[in-house]
Image (cartoon, helix red, strand yellow):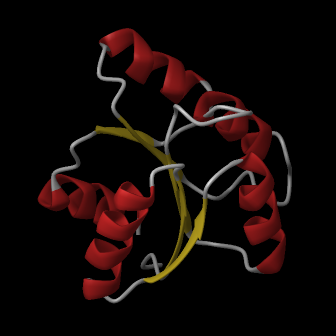
Amino acid sequence: MAIQKVLIVDDSRTELMFLTDLLQKNHMSVRTAQNADEAYKRLAEDRPDLILMDVVMPGQNGYQLTRSINRMPEYSAIPIIMCTSKSLETDRVWGMRQGARDYVTKPVDPGELLAKIKALG
């Protein structure tokens, strides 16, 4: 099934605008959240096909939020792609251990991200 609905969780308005624009141009509907509390609200309102997750955020970070979402039976099947400036191999490995399906570093390469999304669909 192709990815249609994406939830982007990132505390940077610039990043949210960039990713929203990219995904909408590729015929996906986008909802955004700037922290864990907003992310939980968006999940409850409308279940996405994919979550793009930043790591460095105030409050609960992206690793914690990914782990939490993966432990919730109603959301555990939603793939999560970490989308972060944390570029060390240990960061990637930790993100995957928390349940992320893939990992992209910022600045995001649009072609790379779209290919990873398509591979999930």
The part of the image, by quadrant, that contains residue 40 is: bottom right
Q: Residue furthest top?
A: 90
The residue lying toward the viewer, choosing from 26 and 33, is 33
Q: Is residue 9 above or below residue 50?
A: above
The part of the image, by quadrant, that contains residue 46 is: bottom right
Q: Residue at x 75, y 60 (%)?
A: 38
The part of the image, by quadrant, that contains residue 59 is: top right
Image spot of residue 4 (x, y percent): 47, 82
Q: Residue at x 32, y 14 (%)?
A: 89
Q: Is residue 77 left or right of residue 68?
A: left
Image spot of residue 98 (x, y percent): 62, 27
Q: Is residue 49 above or below residue 26?
A: above
Q: Is residue 71 left or right of residue 87?
A: right
Count of all numbered marks drawn on residues in the image = 0
Image spot of residue 86 (x, y percent): 36, 24
Q: Residue at x 54, y 49 (%)?
A: 11
Quadrant of the image containing the C terminus: bottom left
Q: Residue furthest bottom?
A: 27
Q: Is residue 91 above or below residue 12?
A: above
Q: Residue at x 62, y 72 (%)?
A: 48
